[in-house]
Image (spheres, helix red, strand yellow):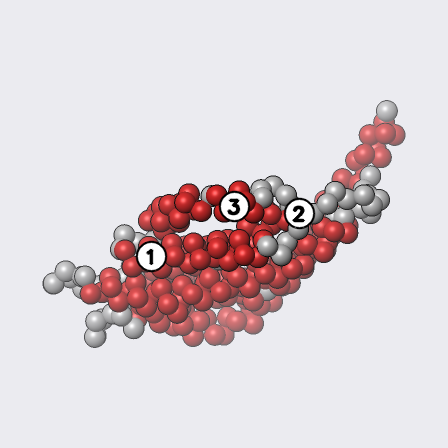
Amino acid sequence: MSEELQQNTQPLIEHLLELRRRTVWAAAGILVCFLGLMPFAQELYSFAAKPLMASLPKDTSMIATDVIAPFFVPVKVTLMAAFLLSLPHTLYQVWAFVAPALYQNEKRLITPLVLSSLTLFVCGMAFAYYLVFPVMFQFLAGVTPSGVSMATDIDKYLSFILGMFVAFGMTFEVPVVVVLLARMGIVSPEQLKAARPYVIVGAFVIAAVVTPPDVISQILLAVPLIVLYEAGLQCCRFVKPVEKETDAPPENQP
């Protein structure tokens, strides 16, 4: 009994050691990018703050209500940039860890899935930065009551744009999710088409929850979500559900 327990425990320890090694390599990649970008922390923050600064009234600027915020906010922006810059390396480490446990058809699916997900997420962030933020901040600056100075705290501004980046980045992942569901045979294209009315309603509900309470921002999130869902449906026409794997089990399986 003890020999059987030892045989079952040994592969688990090997997997944990491999997981630790891949995690260390991923963290090292982020750290290297972070250290390389630190000299440009102020420029990166200025780039992140540009959409709001362009909409503020003349002779108005953002403020820092926390003593250490002028230092830590640019550092947080730099860390975010380092994470994005090192994301291909991080995804490779994830791939290297899970690849031995995948069948051949699953390996063929993972590579385009990861590349398309990364590309669409970055496109979502760019859409938010270059289109949504200028319109949103211009609207908010225009409805500011008379006698009120629109002086935003830099830490709260960073938290806000990070949330918006995640929201729009995840929204742009909709085609990948739709194609993946069809590819895995979880739902059929006909079922996805039948769900259109619910998707439209859900898009506006999500937009109302995630974005600020102005109609423009909500439309700028809901409409791309609906369009991307339709794009995913069109892609499903060229995707066949994956067949059951009949090959030998993956390597490194106990």
- Calculate the distance from the C-alpha at mark 2 to the C-alpha at mark 3: 14 Å
The answer to whether the residue labelled 2 contacts the one labelled 3, judged by CB atoms less than 8 Å apart, is no
Q: Which residue is mark 2?
A: 241
**Badge 2: how crowded within 10 Å, few (<14), some, or many (20+)?**
some
**Badge 1: how crowded within 10 Å, few (<14), some, or many (20+)?**
some
Q: Quadrant of the C terminus?
A: top right
**View extreme (top): residue:** 1
Q: Quick one: 73 or 210, which is closer to the camera?
A: 210
Q: Position of residue 217 (x, y in %)?
A: 32, 58
**Which element type, helix, strand or loop, lies under badge 3?**
helix
- Calculate the distance from the C-alpha at mark 2 to the C-alpha at mark 1: 33 Å
Left/right placement of residue 139 relative to residue 38 reads left
Looking at the image, which residue is at 12% across and 63% down?
146
| Residue 110 in which image quadrant | bottom right
Q: Which residue is mark 1?
A: 219
What amino acid type is highlighted by mark number 2?
Answer: Pro
Q: Position of residue 188 (x, y in %)?
A: 58, 44
Q: Is residue 3 visible?
A: yes
Q: Is residue 31 visible?
A: no
Who comes first in sequence, dot 2 or dot 1?
1
**Which element type, helix, strand or loop, lies under badge 2?**
loop
Q: Which mark is residue 60?
A: none
Looking at the image, which residue is at 76% across and 39% down?
12
Q: Quadrant of the N terminus?
A: top right
Q: Position of residue 174 (x, y in %)?
A: 50, 53
**Which element type, helix, strand or loop, lies under badge 1?**
helix
What amino acid type is highlighted by mark number 3?
Answer: Leu
Q: Which residue is mark 3?
A: 192
Looking at the image, which residue is at 30% across and 66% down?
135
